[in-house]
Image (tube, rainbow, N blue to C red):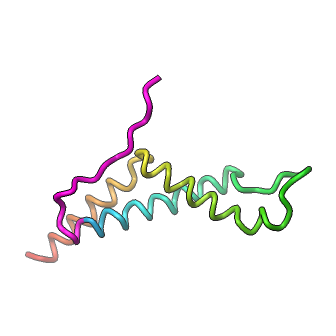
């Protein structure tokens, strides 16, 4: 089985484009985190669990897992958002 390779942003992008890509990735991560929460990830188990501490920090775990998914390629949402933001920025400069 072939390992999933992370999406690597080109290093020759201007500073503004890096900020757009970061914003797009963060938005996809937030979307994926909400989907993971809806799927029950981060919910406390009914039986033996980690108690209130687990409940307090579960959202951090879900958010980091979502960002790891985005870094590994995600679902392609961040690339679509990035292209739309880039096009919108270019329209405003003309």
Which quarter of the picture shows residue 24? bottom left
Indicate the position of residue 28 as horizontal and vertical percent values: 45, 58
In the image shown, does 72 or 46 lie closer to the viewer? 72
Identify the residue at image location x=63%, y=64%: 60
Where 73 sits versus 78, above or below? above
- Residue 22: x and y in percent read 35, 65
Front in this rendered view, residue 71 or 30: 71
Q: Residue furthest right?
A: 47
* Residue drawn at x 15%, y 69% as measured from the top left: 90
Main SS class of the magenta portion in the image? loop
Q: How many marks?
A: 0
Q: Is residue 93 left or right of residue 76?
A: left
Residue 21 part of the magenta segment: no
Measured as percent of width and height from the top left, residue 78 is found at 37, 56
The outermost residue toward the left is: 94
Identify the residue shown where x is 17% and y is 67%. 14
Q: In terms of image quadrants, where is residue 20?
A: bottom left
What residue span does the magenta drawing correspond to?
Answer: 1-17
**Quadrant holding the C terminus:** bottom left
Quadrant of the image occupied by residue 87: bottom left
Q: Is 4 placed left or right of 33 in the picture?
A: left
């Amino acid at each position: 089985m072939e390992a999933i390779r992370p999406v690597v942003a080109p290093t020759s992008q201007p500073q503004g484009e890096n900020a757009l890509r970061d914003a797009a990735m963060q938005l996809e991560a937030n979307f994926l985190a909400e989907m993971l929460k809806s799927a029950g990830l981060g919910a406390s188990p009914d039986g033996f669990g980690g108690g209130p501490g687990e409940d307090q920090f579960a959202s951090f775990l879900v958010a980091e897992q979502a960002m790891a998914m985005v870094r590994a390629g995600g679902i392609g949402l961040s690339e679509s958002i990035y292209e739309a933001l880039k096009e919108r920025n270019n329209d405003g400069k003309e």
